[in-house]
Amino acid sequence: MKRLTRLTRRFAALVVGHGLVLFARLITAPRAIWAGVEPVAKQRIYFANHTSNGDFVLAWAVLPPHLRKKTRPVAASDYWLKNKLRAFVGGEVFRAVLINREKEERTEDPVDLMVAALDEGSSLILFPEGNRNMGPDPLLPFRTGLYHLASKRPDVDLVPTWIANLNEILPKGEVIPLPLLCTITYGEPIHLRRNESKEAFLKRAEKALLDQRPDTEVQE
């Protein structure tokens, strides 16, 4: 019976996952621009800007199926474990690496959780700003998680991934997205350099991500 239940949940997760991909493509007509890498089966950490709750879904859904199957978003456990439906979607559809944002309540180190996912062969989608950027600056200062991942697994490609227009498609507080075109641009991978400081690496990572912004956003 337990095995049947697991198979049923796995099948339901596949169906829901396909449905979310179709919904994302229908609403946003997302276009992936592979500017600095090819969509090949290689382990990567896609680090992206964060302006909307929809970033999580779109960054996962826009990947080709053979990459999506091996890619796990990193997300906040307090949001995705809030109820049974979110726990099912976050844990079994996206297979997200769930991080507790409350330091005093943590029982596991977030970097250790992400490293464990990498060691299992997964790629990751990471939002190094930590929180959604609701201000006028294009990026919030990066937190240190990306640096620690790069230190522990220096051979894994770090791919700057710019998500454009999603904050207009799903503004804060809105539930129903607006049907607008969204682009996701994948830049040239970076790696931690030998003897590079944390501060220098994070500034270089921020610049690599900003370099993927469309010209229309830069001009605004």
Image (cartoon, grey):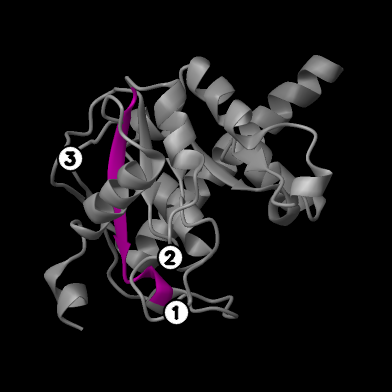
The crowd level at tag 3 (other Cα within 10 Å; few <14, some 14-19, many 20+) is some
Which amino acid does the dot numbered 2 rest on?
A: Leu
In the image, residue 189 above or below residue 217: above
Residue range highlighted in magenta: 156-167
- Which residue occupies the foreground of this view, 202 or 36? 202
Which amino acid does the dot numbered 1 rest on?
A: Gly
From mark 2 to mark 3, how far is it between C-alphas?
A: 21 Å
Mark 2–mark 3 contact, CB under 8 Å? no
Residue receiving disc 3 = 188
From mark 2 to mark 1, how far is it between C-alphas?
A: 8 Å
Residue receiving disc 2 = 140
Q: Going by the image, does 191 lie left or right of 173?
A: left
Residue 8's spot in the image, x, y percent?
72, 29
Q: Residue at x 65, y 29 (%)?
A: 10
Residue receiving disc 1 = 135
Q: Quadrant of the N terminus?
A: top right
- Which residue occupies the foreground of this view, 199 or 5? 199
